[in-house]
Amino acid sequence: MADKLIIFDTTLRDGEQSPGASMTKDEKIRIAKQLERLRVDVIEAGFAAASPGDFESIKAIAGIIKESTVCSLSRANDRDIARAAEALAPAARKRIHTFIATSPLHMEKKLRMSPEQVLEQAKQAVRFARNFTDDVEFSPEDGSRSDIDFLCRVLETVINEGATTINFADTVGYGVPELYGNMLKTLRERIPNSDKAVWSVHCHNDLGMAVANSLAGIMIGGARQIECTINGLGERAGNTSLEEVVMAVKTRKDYFRLDVGIDTTQIVPASKLVSQITGFAVQPNKAVVGANAFAHASGIHQDGVLKARDTYEIMRAEDVGWTANKIVLGKLSGRNAFKQRLEELGIELESETEVNAAFARFKELADRKAEIFDEDIIALVADEQHSH
Ligand code: KIV
Ligand code: ZN
């Protein structure tokens, strides 16, 4: 049996850190319910200590969601952790996710703490979190820019304290797939108790490599959890896109050989809901969820797809929640696509000569108009029939 890949969605936490994407409690509940329909394994519902509003949202979600684990982020201190535990109390399954920065830059300039102090704080935090749940995740923030020897010490310590998931954070999107994957592999090889925890990837998209880095973390590094968000929402340039990693792993199962529990038909509804609530439009050419992801405009492609969809489609639009693929009629379209649309519209022309004449008029119109709609075709054929 293939290993399972755990999908940890952080749309409601890291996604909300996207400037301008803040959400109300009711909006968060609607998204959480959709994430449960999507069957994500873990929903990071927020950061309980960040604000009373975040606390209330997590608490409400924890009371409603039954199938997914509900998680709250917390800094590595008792107050944050206790607040997370309180918000998560109603949850059927709960996880506390605690983090502290481990890179020299963050420790010195931001935390103003020595490495030894950071190590001790990480240890105490995980120990304290274990009082509330057996499911404790630890993230070394800015992990990919941390010293590997120090990271080994911190991670070995927190696993000994009972951390069950170790999330290797590429906080500023600095990773390059091969290097990020290999760093994770080295950590897992060097830490003696590494097999006591599930390893996770958390990548930001500053250089547009969040998805590639996450997948390298799985294939090279052996991670079995991916942290991601709907539409790749998140701090700065965003996080790893859930829809992209899920469909990559599913479509190329021949290579990844991992099982994912996601109901992919809920992907597009989730994308639309998040876009509508946050007001962040999805770019048309975005993989999987963009309006053009399954649209064919060129004559050669349209002809191929009409004969056999696999010619230009590696996934089915219907499998990710679109109603169908799209043949966009425009100046690049061929006669076959035009004829097919006439049939779909129930328009019967008497002869091939009439089809040819209508097609010629369609091409003239398409030179003036970027996209031809069904109404244009109906009008064009009616004109043609009138002129005879
Ligand atoms: O990017 C990051 O480092 C985070 C951590 C809190 C996991 O979001
Ligand atoms: Zn992050």
Image (cartoon, grey):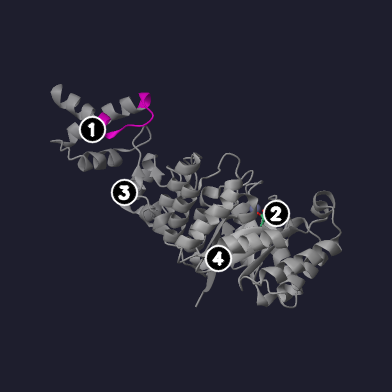
Which span of residues is magenta-colored? 367-377
User: Image point 31% across, 25% down: which residue?
Assistant: 365
* CB within 8 Å, label 2 to label 3: no
Q: CA distance from mark 1 to mark 4?
A: 69 Å
Residue 185, which numbered label?
Answer: none
Which comes sooner in the sequence, label 2 or label 3?
2
Callout 1, which amino acid? Asn
Q: Which mark is residue 89?
A: 4
Q: Badge 3 is on which residue?
A: 306
Q: Find the residue positioned furthest to the top.
A: 387
- Per the image, the residue denoted by label 2 is 175
Please give the label number shown on residue 356: 1
Q: Nearer the viewer, mark 3 or mark 4?
A: 4
Rendered location of residue 85, percent (x, y): 61, 64
- Check mark 4 vs ligand 1: CB closer than 8 Å? yes or no: no
Q: Is mark 1 within 8 Å of ligand 2?
A: no
Residue 111 painted magenta: no
